Image: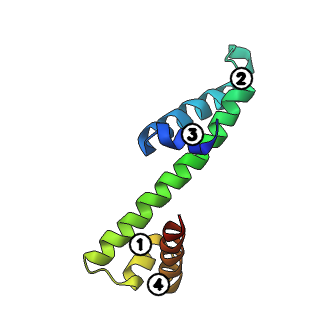
Amino acid sequence: MTPDELERRHTLLTATSRYDELRMRDALAVLNPDTGAAALTATEMLEMLALSEVVIRKAGYGRQTTIRSARAAGASWAQIGAAVGSSKQAAWEAHQRWLDAREEQ
């Protein structure tokens, strides 16, 4: 499965839930090998990897739309930078790159 295929099938919530399910199963199998918990298959490991990309993408989309909404509500770039843990310049540049990429698509 590719991230593109999974992205169409999952919301952020369902992708995160499935990722957490797989991650927990993997962690339990590694930490407690004597319990008989089955290790993930290669297919499941690849699904978990692809899901991590889906979560990153969907969270990024949400972040950018929230930034747009914050600007529309009157927030300054300095305030937005503080909210995302960066400078106002870095926040603006990251958002501008995202807008430019969206236009290219």
Q: Which is more N-terminal, label 1 or label 4?
A: 1
Q: Is residue 11 left or right of residue 36?
A: left
* Percent coordinates x, y for residue 25 in the rendering: 62, 27
**Cα gap from disc 4 to disc 2, whole angstroms:** 45 Å
Q: Which is more N-terminal, label 3 or label 2?
A: 3
Q: Is residue 76 above or below residue 69?
A: below
Q: Residue at x 38, y 70 (%)?
A: 67
Q: Which residue is mark 1?
A: 83
Q: Is residue 44 above or below residue 35?
A: below
* Percent coordinates x, y for residue 75 in the rendering: 31, 80
Q: Which is more N-terminal, label 3 or label 1?
A: 3
**Cα gap from disc 1 to disc 3, whole angstroms:** 32 Å
| Circles 4 and 2: CB atoms closer than 8 Å | no
* Percent coordinates x, y for residue 76 in the rendering: 34, 84
Question: Residue 5's mark?
Answer: 3
Mark 2 falls on what kind of element?
Answer: loop
Q: Nearer the viewer, mark 4 or mark 1?
A: 4
Query: Dot 4, how many residues are within 10 Å of its Cα: few (below 14), some (14-19), or many (20+)?
Result: some
**Cα gap from disc 2 to disc 3, whole angstroms:** 24 Å
* Amino acid residing under circle 4: Lys
Q: Which residue is mark 4?
A: 88
* Percent coordinates x, y for residue 66 in the rendering: 36, 65
